[in-house]
């Protein structure tokens, strides 16, 4: 959130690394499967990304206990949830990917700052916690 917006490529440009399909349909996103799998390497990648990008809100232990969560509660706003909760563990991988990509409530969108591969690594890490 503290980085400036990234410039979009000019109209008609051809991507050289492959283009990510836009996530415009939540129901279709539910059917997506995590291409990373639950390997140690992808869990570690997700853990590093989590500590850098998510821990300040969801807590170092992903339990929803953080300074930011306390501030949200004090202000009467819904705090970031524990990523170890049943409500999160029951969500499909595609739903978690959607939320990380597009944000929800006060959670920002991460699709401009993290690649699809990095967002899937976060899904893998969240799964490893449950």
Image: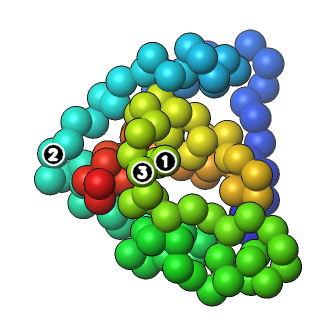
Mark sitting on residue 86: 3
The residue furthest right is 75
Mark sitting on residue 39: 2
Q: Is residue 52 visible?
A: no
Contact flag, marks 3 and 2 (Cβ < 8 Å): no
> Taking 92 as reference, is 58 left or right?
right
Please give the residue where the numbered disc 1 appears in the rendered image. 87
Q: Dot 2 surroundings within 10 Å: few (below 14), some, or many (20 or more)?
A: few
Mark with earlier residue (1, 2): 2
Question: Residue 66, percent across and down?
Answer: 57, 82
- Residue nearest the viewer, comparing 11 with 52: 52
> Foreground mark, 3 or 2?
3
Question: Residue 38, percent across and down?
Answer: 20, 42
* Label 2 SS: loop
Q: CA distance from mark 1 to mark 3?
A: 4 Å
Where on the picture, by quarter, is residue 70? bottom right
């Amino acid at each position: 959130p503290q980085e400036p917006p990234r410039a979009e490529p000019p109209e008609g440009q051809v991507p050289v690394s492959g283009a990510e399909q836009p996530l415009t349909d939540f129901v279709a996103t539910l059917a997506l499967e995590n291409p990373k799998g639950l390997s140690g390497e992808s869990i570690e990648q997700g853990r590093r990304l989590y500590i850098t990008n998510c821990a300040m809100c969801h807590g170092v232990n992903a339990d929803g206990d953080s300074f930011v969560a306390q501030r949200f509660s004090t202000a009467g706003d819904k705090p970031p949830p524990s990523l170890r909760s049943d409500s999160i563990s029951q969500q499909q991988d595609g739903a978690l990917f959607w939320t990380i990509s597009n944000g929800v409530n006060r959670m920002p969108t991460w699709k401009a700052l993290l690649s699809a591969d990095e967002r899937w690594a976060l899904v893998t890490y969240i799964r490893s916690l449950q």
